[in-house]
């Protein structure tokens, strides 16, 4: 699909035109590859880097097929034939795609781990950090069905107990266009003055320590971020192999999946090996009962909990 022809997409609770003033086109930073300081400066300036062709395209497509086979083998017939196309039964909703986050048989299957922990990300992060790098064992591997999306948040609220230089690497498994649910960056949100109070309050929250009930997202409405605090929402159509990497303080969310194609992606986390590690994400995890936050949040489970509404009222934002 031509990227310059405006299309109607959904960003959280908003129907928006893409590309438009509200949701602009991401520009890649491939021209900076080979100049580590320029990459660091760009990450610091924008809060993210968008890199095309970071992974090997064929390896990403093989990983995608492995995940689709895993989802289809669930035996509930929710993936239509031929399975490789990744078309879901149009009735598919929460629960029809197995929960795949953690360190488990699918995240660490050969085809998937080859992409997630292969020589390319290892070399890239070693150069970016200027030291040996490590990645969490926990992998946020997701299959997203029609109408699902991720609300606006910063990652620090979920994994802020270790290195302050932790970086998220978002890898779409396959060609993922904006109508299938792409990740959107709020450029500048990690450091613009308008976000000061937001970062001092919400951005510094530890959702687990606070006993937060729900997803941990600040809002479902992108305008509540950009109109109140500033920043610029950006996304693009991704090709298999492309990635986004961003800081723990960069506000991001996803567009809704408006199709019956399963949107498969994985977030991995990288940091300098010598810095403190958030131990919650090292080890083996394979059961759904660990899930508290994000799209699969089970809100009734957290005892003595608070809600995001209560916290926002207290913070005055
Ligand atoms: O893939 C998504 O929908 C959300 C990913 C995300 O929020 C993250 O990478 O931190």
Image (spheres, helix red, strand yellow):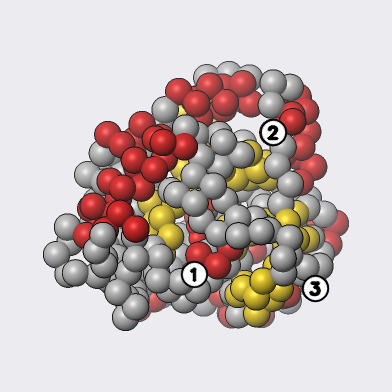
Secondary-structure class at tag 1: loop
Q: State the separation of the CA atoms marked 1 and 2.
A: 27 Å
The residue lying toward the viewer, choosing from 110 and 277, is 110
The x, y position of residue 119, in whole percent, is: 45, 23
| Label of residue 117 in the image | none
* Mark 2 / mark 3, whichever is N-terminal: 2
**Residue at 65%, 43% in the rendered image:** 50
User: Residue 22, relative to residue 114: is it above or below?
Assistant: below
**Residue at 39%, 76% in the rendered image:** 299
Q: Can residue 264 be seen in this view?
A: yes
* Mark 3 / mark 1, whichever is N-terminal: 3
The x, y position of residue 307, in whole percent, is: 51, 77
Q: In which quarter of the image is the N terminus?
A: bottom right
Mark 1 crowd level (few <14, some 14–19, many ≥20, 10 Å Cα)? many
Secondary-structure class at tag 3: helix
The x, y position of residue 217, in whole percent, is: 55, 68
Per the image, the residue denoted by label 2 is 30
**Residue at 54%, 47% in the rendered image:** 239
**Residue at 56%, 42% in the rendered image:** 242
User: Residue 128, relative to residue 220: is it above or below?
Assistant: above
* Mark 1 / mark 2, whichever is N-terminal: 2
- Position of 312 with respect to 112 (left or right) is right
* Contact (Cβ within 8 Å) of mark 2 with mark 3: no
Quick check: is the Cβ at mark 2 less than 8 Å away from ligand 1?
no
Per the image, the residue denoted by label 1 is 257
Per the image, the residue denoted by label 3 is 227
- Position of 310 with respect to 84 (left or right) is right
């Amino acid at each position: 699909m031509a990227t310059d022809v405006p299309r109607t997409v959904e960003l959280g609770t908003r129907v928006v035109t893409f590309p438009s003033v509200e949701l602009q086109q991401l520009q890649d930073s491939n021209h900076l590859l080979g100049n580590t300081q320029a990459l660091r400066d760009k990450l610091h300036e924008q809060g993210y880097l968008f890199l095309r062709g970071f992974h090997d395209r064929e390896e990403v497509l093989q990983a995608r097929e492995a995940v689709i086979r895993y989802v289809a083998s669930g035996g509930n017939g929710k993936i239509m034939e031929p399975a490789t196309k990744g078309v879901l039964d149009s009735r598919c909703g929460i629960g029809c795609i197995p929960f795949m986050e953690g360190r488990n048989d699918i995240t660490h299957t050969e085809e998937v781990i080859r992409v997630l922990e292969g020589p390319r990300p290892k070399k890239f992060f070693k150069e970016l950090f200027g030291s040996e790098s490590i990645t969490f064992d926990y992998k946020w591997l997701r299959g997203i069905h029609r109408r699902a999306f991720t609300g606006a948040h910063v990652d620090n609220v979920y994994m802020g107990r270790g290195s302050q230089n932790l970086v998220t690497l978002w890898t779409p498994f396959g060609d993922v266009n904006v109508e299938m649910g792409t990740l959107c960056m709020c450029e500048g949100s990690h450091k613009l003055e308008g976000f000061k109070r937001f970062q001092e309050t919400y951005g510094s929250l530890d959702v687990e320590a606070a006993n937060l009930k729900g997803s941990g997202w600040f809002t479902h409405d992108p305008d509540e971020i950009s109109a109140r605090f500033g920043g610029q929402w950006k996304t693009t159509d991704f090709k298999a192999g492309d990635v986004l990497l961003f800081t723990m303080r960069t506000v991001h969310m996803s567009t809704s999946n408006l199709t019956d194609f399963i949107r498969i992606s994985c977030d991995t986390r990288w940091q300098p090996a010598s810095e403190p590690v958030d131990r919650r994400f090292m080890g083996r995890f394979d059961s759904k009962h660990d899930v508290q936050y994000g799209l699969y949040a089970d809100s009734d489970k957290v005892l003595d909990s608070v809600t995001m509404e209560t916290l926002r009222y207290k913070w005055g934002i």
